[in-house]
Image (spheres, helix red, strand yellow):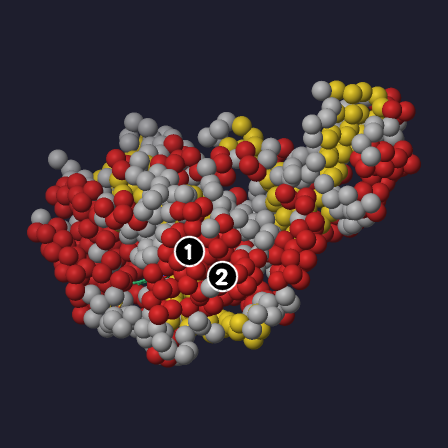
């Protein structure tokens, strides 16, 4: 019997943690019970994008997209939709920004402005089934490369495409391939960097979970182009699902003769090993990563020599980011001109971002380079939730910078972001609203880098610590005017004298917030006022006597009995000395009688 | 595996993905509301699916819709072929469905005996 429905169940890590597996097994049961198993196929895919709305389902033909599906919805979906053809409207995506319910996935604003190249298969195919990948044109690029193209031609194509590394620095990929190809060594190595240590980033994880073969194919093409026979994929241990699917994919590729000694019977040999990292941020730095592959402690070393000359075990090594690898097969299939025409002239192609923070639609998005921050945050991301005001956006994670509202129309490309004191980074976008204190944000990122510093060089190890101490002093309400200059000069020193990119970029969050949100630092220091009412040392809870109705709620929740009063006899009293500023009373007061204030009284 | 074999696998496997591509030339829409089902729409659908698969037709999708308000004609089936008017059939049965597949979907001639409406 012919199949009439493909039901795609998102099985990316976020949906798995919101129990997509239970939805899937409930679907399988119900479909079976209704005798529909031959007509309907269930497919587990990688991340479909809007992770916060998971578990999500996509149903073909038609492209119906269901969000927040629970096992309890399954009977209705099968009965109404699969049997009777009436989509279950309450599970469709309501998009307040467009004031409508989207009947089909492609009508959802979240998807409309995206252009999926690297993620084209992610959420559309079963990543554990190599035939589905092949059906979408998978391994055709490899086949053509091995049978129709010389290594030189491939490298020229890559150079002409203008592809730049997606791991952060944006180095031209074709040039890197050329350097490695020109090395004379007999043994060369290809590495995929999927360490992905930025907090909040999950681009590479999602690619490996959703379309691992695209990374394998990209690496194999490169291996042929530069003359390598061995490769490593370096993934962090925190990504068990990505590791499992990647290993499955490698196994399938080997069995199909797409990896191994005689690839596609052309005589070309290449094989891959998965190396699992312990999850230190610095291990994403290429020289530290190479040390870690060699079984050494993951510490950066000085360059030159660059990995292209001396990398894994001293062999010339080509190292690219997972997303960079995901682009290769498309460039080989469609050509350099095609790729160069997407995005901007300086930064061609698309970029995958992990959108998080104070934004309605968090998740995984892919847009052409040159898309503005505003389009990503407001059109795709749906803007700021709860009617709050946008304050800043951090790109590039802990190595990046905070960009204020006046630059929202900046196109996303390597140079434009750098000009603002931020960086592209590997693709984290964290949105902040009026409730975020920028001094506190800077402290949060610096705390991360200070902790992750490998300690090899003094400016990074000690400098970030001193900067963190200053930030703590300021948020504790003990800051002095001179601290701002101290922070700035320390930041510049750490950036210019650290050995690796971790130290060189660690001050970015501080320097960029000083530049764009200097008034917040001033207010913390001079008025002990935290505009966002975040820093505990600077906020006070106060009961407004006129609004209090003596309902007694606040008194019962206060953990330190800072609140006193008699039910029915307003107003209640709050003792500021005892109060630990936990905020519980303000949460429970039914009359909004408890205000949070900040700043010196006078 | 050689490149030619890879391409053969692709040929076969891409048929498996045809539902997801949404570019089928022919769409068969079966009215599967409560009254449609009561009148035997399930058997009609099963017959369509079976006949389409037996004949190895790859650019056809079969979908369903709810009540059509044509209670006396149930089960109702619409056939939509790109570039042609929509043809609706009424009082369908499994056997009629098989005839529609052969005569209409394969040979391109609507089975006038069961047609209740032509539109567009
Ligand atoms: C502290 C630090 C962390 C890094 N983390 C990553 C990472 O997680 N993933 C990545 O691809 N590149 C990371 N990089 C960049 C790599 O050193 C290297 O430039 C990159 O893997 C090259 O690949 P690409 O040219 O394809 O971007 C990091 C760099 C630094 C300094
Ligand atoms: S800059 Fe920091 S992380 Fe990098 S080598 Fe120096 S101490 Fe280690
Ligand atoms: S909860 Fe609000 S209204 Fe009730 S006693 Fe406390 S301050 Fe007054
Ligand atoms: S993991 Fe399901 S949408 Fe991202």
Q: Which chain is mark 2 on?
A: A
For the point 86% across and 40% down, the residue is: B47
For the point 52% across and 35% down, the residue is: A108
Kindly identify which residue carries mark 1: A157
Pointers 2 and 1 in contact (C-beta within 8 Å): yes
Are discs 2 and 1 located on one and the same chain?
yes
* Location of residue A220 in the rendering, given as x and y in whole percent from the top left corner: 50, 66
Which image quadrant shows ligand 2?
bottom left
Tag count: 2
Query: What secondary structure is marked by label 2?
Result: loop
* Location of residue A216 in the rendering, given as x and y in whole percent from the top left corner: 51, 63
Q: Is B67 positioned to the left or the right of B96 in the image?
A: left
For the point 50% across and 27% down, the residue is: A99
Kindly identify which residue carries mark 2: A149
For the point 87% across and 24% down, the residue is: B112
Which quarter shows the C terminus of chain B? top right
């Amino acid at each position: 019997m012919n199949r009439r429905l493909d039901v795609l169940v998102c099985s990316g890590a976020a949906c798995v943690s919101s129990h997509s597996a239970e939805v899937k097994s409930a679907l399988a049961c119900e479909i079976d019970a209704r005798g529909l198993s031959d007509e309907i196929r269930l497919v587990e895919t990688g991340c479909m994008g809007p992770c916060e709305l998971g578990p999500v389902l996509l149903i073909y033909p038609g492209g119906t997209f269901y969000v927040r599906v629970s096992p309890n919805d399954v009977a209705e979906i099968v009965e109404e939709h699969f049997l009777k053809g009436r989509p279950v409207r309450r599970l469709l995506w309501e998009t307040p920004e467009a004031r409508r319910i989207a009947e089909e996935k492609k009508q959802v604003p979240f998807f409309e402005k995206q252009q999926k190249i690297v993620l084209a298969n992610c959420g559309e195919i079963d990543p554990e089934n190599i035939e589905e990948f092949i059906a979408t044109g998978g391994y055709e690029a490899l086949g053509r490369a091995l049978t129709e193209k010389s290594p030189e031609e491939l490298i020229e194509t890559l150079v002409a495409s203008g592809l730049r590394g997606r791991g952060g620095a944006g180095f031209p990929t074709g040039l890197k391939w050329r350097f490695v190809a020109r090395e004379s060594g007999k043994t060369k190595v290809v590495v995929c960097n999927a360490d992905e240590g930025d907090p909040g980033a999950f681009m590479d994880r999602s690619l490996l979970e959703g379309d691992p073969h695209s990374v394998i194919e990209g690496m194999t093409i490169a291996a042929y182009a530069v003359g390598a026979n061995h490769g490593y994929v370096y993934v962090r241990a925190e990504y068990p699902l990505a590791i499992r699917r990647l290993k499955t994919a490698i196994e399938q590729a080997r069995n199909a003769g797409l990896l191994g000694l005689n690839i596609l019977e052309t005589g070309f040999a290449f094989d891959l090993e998965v190396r699992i990292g312990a999850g230190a941020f610095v291990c994403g730095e290429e020289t530290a990563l190479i040390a870690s592959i060699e079984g050494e402690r993951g510490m950066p070393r000085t360059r030159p020599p660059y990995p292209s000359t001396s990398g894994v075990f001293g062999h010339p090594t080509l190292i690219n980011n997972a997303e960079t690898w995901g682009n290769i097969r498309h460039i080989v299939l469609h050509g350099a001109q095609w790729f160069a025409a997407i995005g901007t002239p300086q930064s061609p192609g698309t970029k995958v971002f992990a959108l998080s923070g104070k934004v309605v639609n968090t998740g995984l998005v892919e847009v052409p380079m040159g898309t503005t921050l505003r389009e990503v945050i407001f059109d795709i991301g749906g803007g700021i939730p709860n009617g709050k005001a946008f304050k800043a956006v951090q790109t590039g994670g802990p190595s990046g910078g905070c960009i204020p509202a006046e630059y929202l129309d900046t196109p996303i490309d390597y140079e434009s972001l750098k000009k603002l004191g931020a960086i592209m980074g590997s693709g984290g976008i964290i949105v902040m609203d009026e409730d975020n204190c920028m001094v506190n944000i800077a402290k949060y990122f610096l705390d991360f880098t200070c902790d992750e510093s490998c300690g090899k060089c003094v400016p990074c190890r000690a400098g970030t610590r001193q900067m963190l101490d200053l930030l703590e002093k300021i948020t504790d309400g003990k800051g002095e005017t001179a601290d701002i200059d101290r922070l700035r000069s320390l930041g510049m020193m750490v950036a210019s004298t650290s050995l690796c990119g971790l130290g060189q970029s660690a001050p970015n969050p501080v320097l960029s917030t000083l530049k764009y949100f200097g008034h917040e630092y001033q207010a913390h220091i001079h008025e002990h006022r935290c505009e966002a009412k975040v820093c505990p040392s600077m906020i006070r809870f106060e009961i407004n006597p006129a609004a209090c109705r003596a309902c007694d709620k606040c008194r019962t929740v206060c953990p330190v009995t800072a609140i006193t009063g008699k039910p029915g006899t307003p107003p209640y009293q709050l003792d500021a000395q005892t109060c630990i500023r936990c905020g519980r009373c303000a949460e429970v007061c039914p009359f909004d009688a408890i205000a949070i204030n900040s700043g010196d009284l006078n | 595996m050689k490149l030619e074999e890879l391409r053969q696998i692709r040929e076969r496997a891409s048929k498996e993905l045809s539902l997801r591509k949404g570019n089928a030339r022919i769409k068969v829409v079966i009215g599967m509301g409560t009254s449609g089902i009561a009148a035997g729409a399930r058997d009609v659908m099963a017959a369509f699916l079976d006949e389409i698969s037996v004949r190895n037709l790859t650019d056809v999708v079969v979908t369903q819709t709810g009540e059509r308000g044509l209670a006396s004609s149930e089960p109702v089936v619409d056939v939509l072929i790109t570039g042609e008017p929509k043809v609706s059939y009424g009082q369908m049965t499994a056997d009629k469905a098989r005839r529609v597949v052969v005569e209409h979907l394969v040979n391109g001639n609507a089975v006038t005996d069961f047609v209740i409406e032509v539109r567009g």
